[in-house]
Image (cartoon, rainbow, N blue to C red):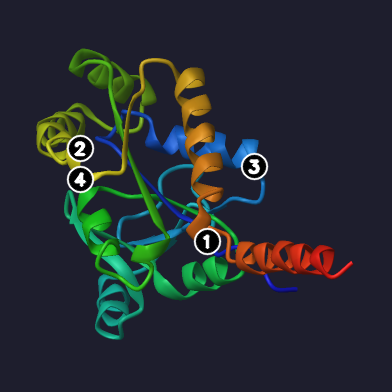
């Protein structure tokens, strides 16, 4: 069956700890038709992470080959590890009318804006309510040691400086409220005229009804 619209590439970016990964998971719970763009990475798995669900874990040689073959929509080096979005599964999902969430940074967003899927993008930047709260969230995750947290905090200012490059910007001062705002944004984006190719045929049918009324 032909999809009623092309899928959306939903870009969520934020400094580490501001909530983009949490919001991505919440959106997929709210709408199970949403899929997650699984990134490839050269870093080792963290406890509980599953191959193909959280990341595709590959070595540096394989990652480099994918870049050279044009198989990555975007890629970047973060804290000594490489991350990127494989192209084929994303393009297949969008063509089938399925929305895809990207949990990426500003560098990846800039690359996607120059890629083949740029017309399908809606980009959202999530800000923390304060820098103190950002650090508290990073520490409460219990995933990184003090040295890594310090590096993430040092990088946050540069990441936040790119907020104006995004279509929407949300301050994540309350998880539930932020989720509701994201839902509203997605519902509105899905209803944009340009994302509903079936409307042309529908309006043509309305015009035909007018002509039929004139002849009776």
Q: The residue tagged with tag 3: helix, strand or loop?
A: loop
Residue 123 picture location, percent across and down: 34, 47
User: Are discs 4 and 1 less than 8 Å apart at CB?
Assistant: no
Disc nearer the start of the sequence (2/1): 1
Q: Nearer the viewer, residue 115 or 193?
A: 193
Residue 180 picture location, percent across and down: 53, 25
Q: The residue tagged with tag 4: helix, strand or loop?
A: helix
Q: Nearer the viewer, residue 119 or 175?
A: 119
Graded by Cα atoms within 10 Å as few (under 14), some (14 to 19) or many (20 or more), the crowding at tag 3 reads few
User: Are discs 2 and 4 less than 8 Å apart at CB?
Assistant: yes
Disc nearer the start of the sequence (4/3): 3
Task: Say which residue appears at 30% left-offset and 86% top-offset.
Answer: 69
- Residue 31's disc number: 3
The Cα atoms of the two marked residues, 2 and 1, are separated by 30 Å
Quickly name the residue at label 2. 163
Quickly name the residue at label 1. 52
Q: Residue furthest front?
A: 215
The Cα atoms of the two marked residues, 4 and 3, are separated by 27 Å
Residue 4 lies left or right of residue 216; in this view the side is left
Disc nearer the start of the sequence (3/1): 3
Q: Using the image, determine if residue 4 lies above or below residue 80.
A: below
Which of discs 4 and 3 lies nearer the camera? The answer is 4
Which of discs 3 and 1 lies nearer the camera? The answer is 3
Residue 75 picture location, percent across and down: 26, 64
The Cα atoms of the two marked residues, 2 and 3, are separated by 26 Å
Q: Residue furthest bottom?
A: 69
């Amino acid at each position: 069956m032909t999809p009623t619209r092309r899928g959306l590439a939903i870009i969520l970016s934020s400094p580490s700890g501001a909530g983009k990964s949490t919001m991505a998971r919440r959106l997929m719970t709210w709408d199970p038709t949403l899929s997650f763009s699984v990134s490839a990475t050269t870093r080792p798995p963290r406890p509980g992470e599953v191959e193909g669900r959280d990341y595709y874990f590959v070595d540096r040689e394989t990652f480099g080959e994918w870049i050279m073959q044009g198989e990555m929509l975007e890629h970047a080096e973060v804290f000594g590890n490489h991350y990127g979005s494989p192209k084929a599964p994303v393009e297949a999902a969008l063509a089938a009318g399925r929305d895809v969430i990207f949990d990426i940074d500003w560098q990846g967003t800039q690359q996607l804006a120059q890629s083949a899927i740029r017309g399908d993008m809606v980009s959202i930047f999530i800000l923390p309510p304060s820098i103190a709260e950002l650090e508290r969230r990073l520490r409460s995750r219990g995933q990184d040691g003090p040295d890594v947290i310090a590096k993430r905090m040092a990088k946050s200012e540069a990441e936040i400086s790119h907020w104006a490059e995004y279509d929407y910007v949300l301050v994540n001062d309350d998880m539930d409220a932020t989720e509701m705002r994201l839902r509203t944004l997605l519902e509105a984006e899905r209803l944009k005229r340009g994302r509903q190719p079936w409307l042309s045929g529908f309006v043509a049918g309305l015009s035909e009804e007018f002509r039929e009324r004139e002849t009776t």
